[in-house]
Image (cartoon, helix red, strand yellow):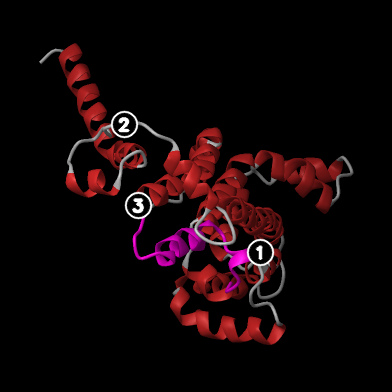
Amino acid sequence: MGFRIKYTLKNVFLLLFGLLLIYPLVWLFFASFKTNNEIFGSLKLLPNSFSWDAYINGWKGSGQFGYGVFLLNTFKLVIPTVLFTIASSSVVAYGFARFNFVLKKPLFALMISTLMLPNTVIIIPRYLQFQKLGWLNSYLPFIVPAIFACYPFFIFMLVQFFRGIPRDLDESAFLDGCGRVRFLISILLPLSKSALFSVAIFQFIWTWNDFFNTLIYIDSVKKFPLSLGLRMSMDATTSINWNQIIAMSIITIIPPVILFFFAQKHFVQGIATTGIKG
């Protein structure tokens, strides 16, 4: 078989496989223009007519607050969490990667061991702790742990990347009068841009899509993020307008998709250079 035939078959296979993967999103988009009867009573991909009513009515919401409020709440929750995660994880990873101190190895092993703890094990003690601190029904249970580098996965990821940067660079910088803090801010972090983008994308998507923790810590509708707002839409009435829920679901996934495509190059580089898989 010639090279051109193999090349063509390979591209056709990849194209078909890509269409298969993206089909649920395509179906979701066209379903937002359908009625309930069309969604559940027909296998056709395209709707009988295109109307933006589902987006307009869905954006208004089903109660006192519309999806504009839920979208703003989500940004209030996600953006500080992502920024503080990047800052705190970078500082802690810098310490583990570049400094020698007493009990460094046991402390690093202890930090890594916390990765093995499932969320269901720590959810009750964390809830009781935040309740005593008066942080329930606020975004503090998400933001404050980010300030104190409570995400060991990101620390481990950055440690792996920092260790790949030659130590000769440190010595050259110190000989030129560069301090430890300035070396981190001016040299190490700019060189670690790919890894930092990976941390930002992971944390953004995980926090943006988080339903379980927001359901536990936030009970006021006016502070609901999009994940809880979508769930509330299905409880509001006995007759559910699925096209409106699907339309709001599409709006919900747009910011993470945009972020991923704009930072895709750095994200892939960060994953490749840190050796993180899965």
Please name whichever residue, 72 or 188, is drawn nearer the observer in this view of the structure.
Answer: 72
Residue at image location 71% in from the left, 55% down from the top = 87
Q: CA distance from mark 1 to mark 3?
A: 36 Å
Magenta run includes residue 229: yes
Q: Amino acid at mark 3?
A: Trp
Q: First in sequence: mark 1 or mark 2?
A: 2
Identify the residue at horizontal 18%, vertical 47% (top origin).
41
Asked if 224 appears above or below 256 in the picture, the reply is: below
Viewer-proximal residue, 68 or 128? 68
Q: CA distance from mark 3 to mark 2?
A: 16 Å
Q: Which mark is residue 146?
A: 1
Which of the 4 quarters of the picture holds residue 53?
top left
Label 3 crowd bin: few (<14), some (14–19), many (20+), radius 10 Å: many
Q: Is residue 172 magenta?
A: no
The stretch of residues the image draws in magenta is 218-241
The structure residue drawn at horizontal position 50% and vertical position 73%, both measured from the top left corner, is 113
* Residue 107 shown left or right of residue 184 in the figure: left
Check disc 1 and give the amino acid type. Ala
For the point 22% across and 30% down, the residue is: 16
Q: Nearer the viewer, mark 1 or mark 2?
A: 2
Dot placed on the residue nearer the N-terminal end, 3 or 2: 2
Q: Amino acid at mark 2?
A: Ser
Mark 1 or 3, nearer chain start: 1
Q: Nearer the viewer, residue 156 or 168?
A: 156
Residue 1 is at least partly visible in this image: yes
Where does the N terminus fall, quadrant-wise? top left
Residue indicated by mark 2: 49
- Kind of element beneath mark 2: loop
Dot 2: within a 10 Å radius of its alpha carbon, few (fewer than 14), some, or many (20 or more) residues? few
Asked whether the residues under the numbered discs 3 and 2 touch, taking CB atoms below 8 Å apart as contact, a structural biologist would say no
- Comparing labels 1 and 3, the label whose residue is closer to the camera: 3
